[in-house]
Amino acid sequence: MLFKVALASLINRRLTALLTVLAIMVSVFVYLSVEHIRDQAKASFGRTVSGVDLIVGPRTGQLNLLLASVFRVGSLNNGIDMETVHKIADNKLVSWWVPLSFGDSHKGFPLVATNTDYFKHYKYGDKQALTFASGDKFASDNQLVLGANVAKKLGYKLGDKVVMSHGLGVTSFSHHEQYPFEVSGILKLTGTPVDQSLFISLEGAEHMHDENSHAAHSAQNSREHEEHEHEHEHEHEHEVEVKEISAMLLGLKAKFATLVIQQQINKLKEQPLMAIIPGVALTEMWRLMGSMEKLLLIISGLVLLAALLGMSTMLLASMRERQREIAILRAMGARPGFIFTIVQLEVLILTMVAIFLAYGLLMLSLFLLKPWLASQYGIFIDLHLTPGLIGQTFIVVLSTAFVIGLLPAISAYRQSLQTGLSH
Amino acid sequence: MSQSSPIVKVSKLQFSYGKNANEQKAADNNWLLDIPEFVIEAGQHVFLRGASGTGKSTLLNILAGIHKVERGQVNILGKDIAQLSGAKRDAFRASHIGFVFQQLNLIPYLSVLDNISLAQYFAQNKLSKKRLLEKAENILSELNISPDLLFQKANQLSVGQQQRVAIARALINDPEILIADEPTSALDSENRDAFMHLLFKLANENNSTLLFVSHDAALSRGFHQVVDITKINKSAMEKHHVV
């Protein structure tokens, strides 16, 4: 009966009730989205790199190096000389190493120059190795391996010829047209930045740049031209020589050596370098993002509060017109507690409906956005909300609603005590 | 009415609104209600007359147990409701007293049946759904209301229909006392006569004691007893009342 009265009372005020539900729905939607995407981001974040003990690069910020080497965001100004690379790699505690060179892109996707060890040693998720969906790693300088999303997005197949451009932008004016690459392999989807990358050999990258500088120089004045001509001919006839790389990944024979090697690299006299531990850097990065995520959470909390206060206002305003109703109920023998309960039931109904609608809306938008997020950003959003998050939402929203609902409910209670039966 | 016994017996009642008012008012002897004695015999139809501001409404609220009485006794059906807790007074009212107001007796957004069921919901002896429906249909047919209206929303009925449904609602729990507070003021003369006729008829059939409150002495025809509030309320008599 209580429920029937509360529901009928809400339906009687359907327009304000609907608007209230919509306001709460939007706020719960924001709250759920922020929480869910944070969960998902955190999970996918920790998956990006695993099994790498140290990342070595030119001296810069820890985050800068991590972003450039793992997430392919930003750039490194300097490189590491090959001599220094070998000095580090020759350390007895180093079990494997992988060179990385950045700076080029293809249609907005970053191009990574490395060697075939990358496919052997780079791990993601729970120490999962990269595997090929088709083809294999590059076998020669003019071959190319594609991340899953790159292949899908650009529609490249095995054997396709691809021309690179210089720089990291989507539009680039200097095309390396003279040196096309042939697709030798396509990687399986990993849910990491690997999916967005193209891989070539270090030597391939050198070839590409030689062609580029050749083309550029040919337009310059003849004196310089002649000087350079000699060099270029020399290089064309012989194997290219890789002089420096952007960064290197290190695997160590023993975990305990990590800090020692890190110290050694940081103190190298040959070149100002730094070594970072991926886990530590990831944690720091997450902490940085964490403060933003807390801000988002606070904002979504405030939005929720505003919506619930709106509901409270709506119910309080309705109390005036419901004075008569309360008197009728009291005359029939309703206790003041009954009136209180009716108002809180209305709060409960409005809030529950709003939560379910918000949940539905989130599912729908995730379902619609999922393919786009995956192909565009390589972000994999799980449609399944954790039971913890759902439970937490119910508890947080309903208890806040209850507390805020106390205002109109207590007002109704007091009114029912004071108002007599007559008009 | 020879073997009648008192169903309502108010004695030495002194009442004013406000929490700390009692000591104050006692000192000044300035009460809103000061009723040495007021008795209604069982089965009587009593017309309580009085202009507004004479404490009529307050007396009704006290008889109904809405207002807590600190001084004096209010015996209804042999029980001093001044001694009962708020919740017990509410339950007592639900089971033993039926109300019909001036107008807007019904919850507008509930159906006629739900309005009647709600009165049942608060009472102690509950009927089955089927019995309740039968009983509601019976009372309504006596009130010349088609059973079809049972499932209509209350606010879709005419005022005259609403007042008649209010009688049905008030009588659904077979209350010993039926209180009507200016129930005809929203009705035109034709509807008013029909309403008074039905009210008497159903009160008789139900053996309910009727307390009819109005300022309009013209309606007092047909009542066993006419009581002027200024005669029982010393405060109104002395015209010291301040609302």
Image (spheres, coloured by chain):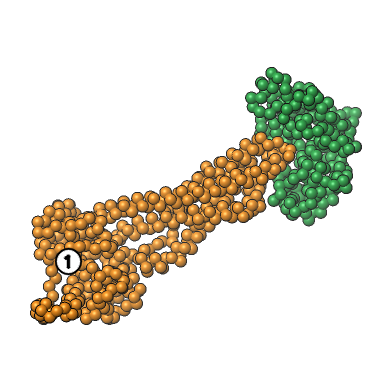
Q: Could you tell me which quadrant the C terminus of chain A lies in?
A: top right
Relative side of A277 to B166, left or right: left
Please say whether residue A132 is visible from this viewpoint. no
Looking at the image, which is closer to me, A383 or A22?
Answer: A22
Task: Say few, some or many: other residues with alpha carbon within 10 Å of mark 1 (under 14 / 14 to 19 / 20 or more).
Answer: many
Label 1 is placed on what type of residue?
Answer: Ile
Q: Is residue A185 above or below residue B25?
A: below
Q: Residue at x 75, y 34 (%)?
A: B57
B162 vs A206: above or below: above
**Residue A263 x, y percent position in the rendering:** 14, 52
Q: Residue at x 15, y 63 (%)?
A: A80
Q: Which chain appears orange?
A: A
Splitting the image into 4 quarters, where does residue A38 fall? bottom left
Q: Can residue A14 be seen in this view?
A: yes
Percent across and percent down for residue A61 are 22, 55
| Chain B on-screen colour | green
Residue drawn at the location 27% of the way across and 71% of the way down: A105
Residue at the spot x=49%, y=53% of the render?
A: A27
Chain of the residue under label 1 = A
Q: Where is residue A370 in the image (x, y as percent from the top left)?
A: 42, 65
